[in-house]
Image: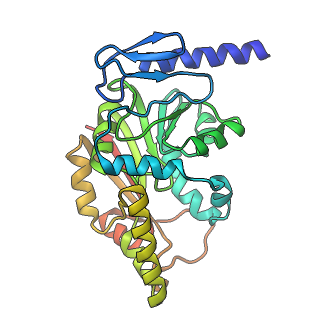
Amino acid sequence: MNREKKDNHSGKNSLFQEIFACPQCHSNMISIDNSLICEKCKDQFLINDKIPSFLPRRITDHKILLAINGWANISWDYDEKITKTNKHLMRSIDSPLIHYCKKNNLVLEIGCGTARLSDAIAAKKCTYIGIDPSLFLLNQGIIKNRTSLLQGIGEFLPFKDGCFDVIIGGYHSFRYIQFRKCLEECARTTKPGGHLVFTLWNGWSLLASSFKFKNLIFNSYLKSILTKNLGTCNDVFSPYHIIKTIESSGFKVQKILSTKKDFPFLKAKPSRSIRYWHGVIGAFFGHNIIFICQKK
């Protein structure tokens, strides 16, 4: 049994090394001992059985550097925090992402954290890879026997062109990322006809939930702290702007779903079924906006 697991693990490592490319210049990598070295720029990346590191070596964008350092200082239990979130709400956010992962697909999750979604995706007979800048969160995933995890960032993906069937960004992982740069990388590494599915928060809904003046001040302060520590905050105030950015990056927006948990006068009645607002107009009402995109 152990030998079979080892063989499967070796097979996965072989697959991953076939699709790896330099995150900085996208050139081929040469395997030497426990490292991959870029043929062109000569950057070196350590490969091991636990968490290979593909953080680019020559980043000049201070906001990206800020985000990497911000996530490096994360020290709380991510999965425990998620379990305290409304289960019905989490299911409504997760379901569309998992739905587009089909049998035999190669799936990348950007900002995977502890790889919370990996089990559900693997159950659909997909091959899962998770990437995140936080070693702390990735190690939490390893402790929970979640594998195929890499340290890296969405703005500089360490993969060859057109290798993924599906790329997902679960539970607002695209909120703290250089949005256009990440979308361009997703378009580069997604197969033609492949899907990108990710979630963002509706900025208007967040403001509407802060009817009390002190809460509005606190949320504004919190957002300023997040922006200061993580470099950016991509809450959606104009769905049209988000769509324009997506479609100029090489994707076509197929569908927009927004969870029905919003303004007090528009709250959905309790229901066991998952219900959404649909389309651009619905994105102004829903709280969590799910963008379903297809590579052109």
Q: Position of residue 4 (x, y in %)?
A: 73, 14
Task: Identify the residue at image location x=45%, y=69%.
Answer: 287
Side (left or right) of 5 relative to 237: right
Asked if residue 172 shows in the view, the reply is yes
Instruction: Decide which of 84, 32 is in the foreground and name it.
Output: 32
Q: Position of residue 72 (x, y in %)?
A: 52, 47
Colour scheme: rainbow
Asked if residue 175 shows in the view, the reply is no
Number of numbered callouts drawn: 0
Quarter of the image where the C terminus is located: top left
Task: Identify the residue at image location x=48%, y=70%.
Answer: 260
Side (left or right) of 251 relative to 15: left
Instruction: Decide which of 56, 184 is in the foreground and name it.
Output: 56
Residue at the farthest bottom position: 213
As drawn, 172 above or below 211: above
As drawn, 75 above or below 125: below
Quarter of the image where the N terminus is located: top right
Q: Position of residue 103 (x, y in %)?
A: 53, 30
Q: Position of residue 178 (x, y in %)?
A: 32, 50
Task: Identify the residue at image location x=34%, y=71%.
Answer: 284
Side (left or right) of 253 relative to 74: left
As drawn, 83 above or below 112: below
Task: Identify the residue at image location x=53%, y=21%.
Answer: 47
Instruction: Decide which of 80, 244 is in the foreground and name it.
Output: 80
Displayed quadrant of residue 274: bottom right
